[in-house]
Image (cartoon, rainbow, N blue to C red):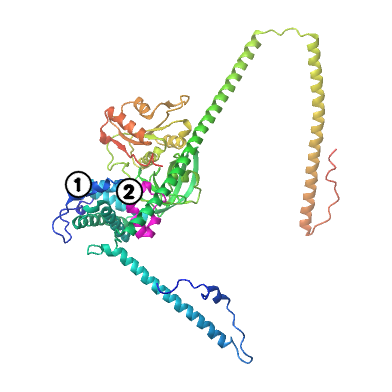
């Protein structure tokens, strides 16, 4: 994070007398927020009436969007006095908004609608001072977001065109896609990108790359069909060779630290949570002396072990890699059976290992709790808990 | 507004411009009849003036309405982007919000429905798979049991003396099978020979056509009854 560009609310005067009254902003926000979903509803309607062209940048259903807006506002208002944290959040937000093709004039439009919304719900409590404070605060927020977005422009495009070069259906509800990004994409093994399918415009969902970045090698994605999941359904069902997807910039912290700690690794993957961990194995292959890696790959039934062939092939070529498949709901399975945390625990003491866990939220939480209970320090456990349970 | 929006009777149809025809001019001169063209231009001009007037008055009306909306807000602090909280605008916001909520509900319903469908399909698939697994286990188990019983009984039982009738039945069965296999063999031989003849014939034709190609022209093939190998 760029601390130099941290927000300094106190120094921000913008031609007015006195600094921002943060307490007053918070009181006002709390009062406005009491109106619940009415607030973001008013905000977006106001924005779309004044700038109808902006409507096309959003999905048809705005329900999730309203939630995102309120979450972001709550986050901003509550961390107003923790400027480093807030700056980091806003920079991420600014970079993330690049893929929506957000331009400078959109920031102005959003600011105006935000003020109109706050004013409407404040009723008689709305004062010129309050208005000036909100305007100044928003100006700061917008400046940080735009600066981060601008800085990011030098690093890569707002979004990548991703052409599907193969689509393999590995199970009833799991597909493996290979996607060629244009231009080439640089990322760290374990990271994810947001994907938008042409049949579900404006809906983005995060998927992890399942291989390490290499020039001219398509990205591998593992997609599990979520019941009713708009994007996962479009990807597993409507996607064929040649389909053009849009990919957002790579993000995520489930990556190998630099330098690598002098420990062996245990990787624990539930279902398509395998993707980031497979990428990490792929990345380790390039090291002169990779650490020992034990990869647990779990699913409910044996047919959910959709990538076992590929993993076993990898293990055959790599003396440092052990792969243990496990199945939780099929007692007839010839290998390990039981829940992943149980299976992992049965295989010994991991407290001196570095653990990477990915998969369904519940499984990730259970596994992390189990590892902690067995004596593993929190900073040895690497988790990225997003996107898995999202439709 | 001073000018009428639509004056349907005298209003020129744009298609007229596409389809207008002018009488041919008098002998000795080329082009359209000048008077007719002038009349037409006159008409176009009148229409054009009317449209410009309409446009101007509409523009004034828009400005007037805009002023009415912005006025209550225009006390110094507004930068012009904010349209203000006039009743009309809030009303519009409410209408759009209601429409959005309805749209959200439609999408949510559709999503819930599709979610239910896939879930049911998945459960049904699991059931079918389980059923198939159970059935195949059962069949295997049954076959296994039968084989074991057969082996055990073969070991335990000594052949019992057959009755005369049973022997007769077995002989009759044997005779029938023997006859059947003879007939079947004869048929098979005939069929195979027929195919062989067909292949020979095909080779012969190919040789002839190759020869033709070498000699540079087709030749009448000898007549051949394609069905002759059928008996």
Q: Position of residue B22 (x, y in %)?
A: 59, 82
- The chain letter under disc 1 is A
Residue A207, image quadrant: top left
- What residue is shown with label 2? A38
Q: Position of residue B106 (x, y in %)?
A: 44, 46
Residue at horizontal 61 percent and vertical 84 percent from the top: B23
Name which of mark 2 and mark 1 comes first in the sequence. 2
Secondary structure, mark 2, is helix
Q: Position of residue A32 (x, y in %)?
A: 26, 48
- What residue is shown with label 1? A82
Kindly indicate whether the residues beneath marks 2 and 1 are on one polypeptide chain: yes
Q: Which residues are magenta?
A: A37-65
Q: Nearer the viewer, residue B191 or A210?
A: A210
Q: Is residue B229 left or right of residue A25?
A: right
Front tag of 2 and 1: 2
- The chain letter under disc 2 is A
């Amino acid at each position: 994070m760029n601390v130099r560009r941290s927000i300094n609310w106190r120094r921000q005067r913008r031609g007015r007398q006195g600094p921002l009254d943060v307490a007053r902003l918070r009181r006002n926000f709390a009062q406005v927020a009491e109106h619940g979903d009415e607030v973001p509803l008013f905000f977006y309607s106001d924005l779309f009436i004044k700038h109808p062209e902006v409507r096309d940048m959003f999905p048809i259903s705005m329900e999730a969007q309203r939630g995102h807006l309120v979450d972001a506002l709550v986050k901003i208002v509550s961390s107003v006095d923790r400027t480093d944290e807030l700056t980091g959040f806003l920079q991420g937000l600014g970079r993330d908004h690049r893929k929506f093709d957000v331009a400078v004039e959109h920031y102005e439009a959003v600011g105006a609608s935000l003020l109109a919304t706050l004013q409407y719900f404040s009723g008689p409590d709305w004062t010129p001072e309050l208005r000036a404070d909100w305007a100044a605060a928003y100006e700061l927020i917008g400046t940080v977001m735009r600066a981060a977005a601008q800085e990011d422009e030098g690093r890569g495009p707002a979004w990548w065109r991703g052409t599907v070069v193969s689509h393999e259906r590995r199970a009833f509800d799991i597909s493996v896609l290979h996607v060629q990004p244009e231009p080439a994409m640089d990322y760290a093994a374990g990271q994810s990108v947001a994907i938008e399918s042409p049949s579900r415009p404006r809906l983005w969902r995060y998927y992890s790359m399942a291989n390490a970045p290499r020039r001219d090698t398509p990205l591998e994605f593992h997609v599990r069909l979520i019941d009713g999941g708009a994007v996962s359904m479009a990807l597993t069902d409507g996607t064929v060779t040649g389909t053009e997807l849009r990919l957002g910039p790579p993000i995520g912290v489930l990556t190998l630290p630099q330098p690598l700690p002098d420990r062996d690794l245990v990787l624990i993957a539930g279902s398509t949570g395998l993707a980031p961990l497979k990428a990490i194995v792929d990345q380790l292959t390039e090291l002169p002396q990779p650490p020992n890696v034990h990869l647990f790959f779990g699913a409910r039934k044996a047919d959910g072990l959709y990538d076992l062939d590929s993993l076993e092939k990898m293990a055959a070529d790599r003396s440092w890699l052990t792969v243990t498949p496990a199945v939780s709901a099929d007692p007839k399975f010839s290998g390990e059976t039981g829940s992943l945390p149980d299976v992992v625990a049965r295989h010994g003491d991991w407290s001196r290992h570095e653990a990477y866990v990915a998969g369904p939220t519940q499984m990730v939480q259970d596994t992390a709790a189990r590892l902690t209970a067995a004596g593993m320090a929190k900073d040895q456990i690497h988790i990225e808990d997003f996107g898995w349970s999202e439709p | 507004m001073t000018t009428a929006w639509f004056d349907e009777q005298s209003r020129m149809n744009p298609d007229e411009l596409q389809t207008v025809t002018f009488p041919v001019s008098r002998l000795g001169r080329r082009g359209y009849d000048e008077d007719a063209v002038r009349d037409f231009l006159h008409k176009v001009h009148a229409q054009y003036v009317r449209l410009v007037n309409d446009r101007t008055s509409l523009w004034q009306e828009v400005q007037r309405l805009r002023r009415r909306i912005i006025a209550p807000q225009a006390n110094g602090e507004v930068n012009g982007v904010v349209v203000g909280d006039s009743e009309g605008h809030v009303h519009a916001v409410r209408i759009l919000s209601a429409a959005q909520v309805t749209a959200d509900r439609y999408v949510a319903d559709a999503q819930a429905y599709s979610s239910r469908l896939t879930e049911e399909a998945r459960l049904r698939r699991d059931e079918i798979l389980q059923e198939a697994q159970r059935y195949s286990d059962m069949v295997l188990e049954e076959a296994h049991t039968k084989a074991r019983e057969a082996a055990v009984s073969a070991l335990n039982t000594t052949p019992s003396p057959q009755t005369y009738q049973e022997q007769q039945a077995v002989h009759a069965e044997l005779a029938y099978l023997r006859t059947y296999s003879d007939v079947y063999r004869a048929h098979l031989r005939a069929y195979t020979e027929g195919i062989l003849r067909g292949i020979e014939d095909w080779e012969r034709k190919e040789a002839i056509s190759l020869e033709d190609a070498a000699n540079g022209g087709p030749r009448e093939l000898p007549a051949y009854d394609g069905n002759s190998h059928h008996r």
